[in-house]
Amino acid sequence: MSKLIITAAVTGSVHTPSMSPYLPVTPDEIANDAVTAAKAGAAIVHVHARDPQTGKPSAEPKLYEEIVRKISARTDAPICITTGGSKEMTVADRARSVALLKPELASLNTGSMNFAFHPLADKLKEPKHDWEVPFIRATDDWIFPNTFKTLAEFATFMTAAGTKPELEVYDAGMLSNVQFLLTTGVLKAPIHLQFVLGILGGMQANVANLVFLHESACRMIGEKNFTWSLSAAGRAQLPMMATAMGMGGNVRVGLEDNLYLAPKVLAKSSAEQVERIMTIAAALSIPVATPTEARQILGLKGADAVGWAAMPAA
């Protein structure tokens, strides 16, 4: 049986500080949440950066550098840096930190889509910051741009950096995009897919959709040519994680995807969600991968080859 890789996504760019007092914002908070999640059993940590004063999503490379240095000083878990960013960032903004820091993994979103979370604005009765409600409401008129041109550009610089793309698939058509990139040589197998379900504008988080995506990937890409993981947003998170684990997939949890541990119970850290997954894995007799084993399974380059390892400390 293949070992389960647990990823902890610790802050993201959808949730805002008013939604939970436990959402990490500063580099120290983000690093602490990632490290505690790794200690709880996460083999990989996935990071976004935020303005430490306002909590607003940020593309500032210096913030990313501070975050990854603080994480890697305390855990050997591979770090995955986002290229998703947020609605107010340009494509160039989204690429900068990965191109500079050359992490072991980076997200690569595989198609353009409506990426909306505007209904969350109605739940913010007393926002802490004046940017939050307008930022959220504006997503009803936003298309998350990931064209074939930018997909090829991102894949090319990741290959040059030795960074493995984590290919984010929100909808079935995005698998066709991945297949095209493989056919044209932009991507090379084996690849790593992450099915992202439950985003308004993408596929709903349910078992039928997950099974359809997995079976489609097996047919289009070849079962031996990819590994895969699941991210499911909101209340569907834990039930869908259990389904993915039963199918032999890997899983992603954390405060980026879900602020709650149970109905009306806020998670105090991403580690709490990782601990739940560890319990489910134990009940299903599924062995959990260490960071070293995750590197072997995914074919990662190793912590000594990341960009910041060769950069002087600030």
Image (cartoon, rainbow, N blue to C red):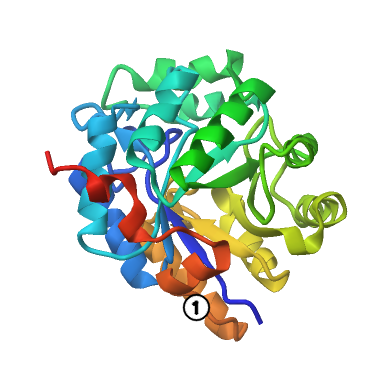
Compared with 17, 257 (above or below) is below
Three-letter residue code for mark 1 = Thr
Q: Quadrant of residue 48?
A: top left
| Image side of residue 247 versus residue 96, left or right | right
Q: Which residue is mark 1?
A: 279
Compared with 146, 288 (above or below) is below
Looking at the figure, which quarter contains the C terminus?
top left
The residue most toward the left is: 314
Disc 1, SS: helix
Looking at the figure, which quarter contains the N terminus?
bottom right
Residue 266, image x and y in percent? Answer: 39, 53
Q: Can see residue 26?
A: no
| Image side of residue 109 versus residue 253, left or right | right
Q: Quadrant of residue 203?
A: top right
- Looking at this view, is 135 or 152 the one in front? 152
Compared with 9, 142 (above or below) is above
- For the point 42% across and 33% down, the residue is 13
| Image side of residue 204 versus residue 49, left or right | right
- For the point 72% across and 43% down, the residue is 204
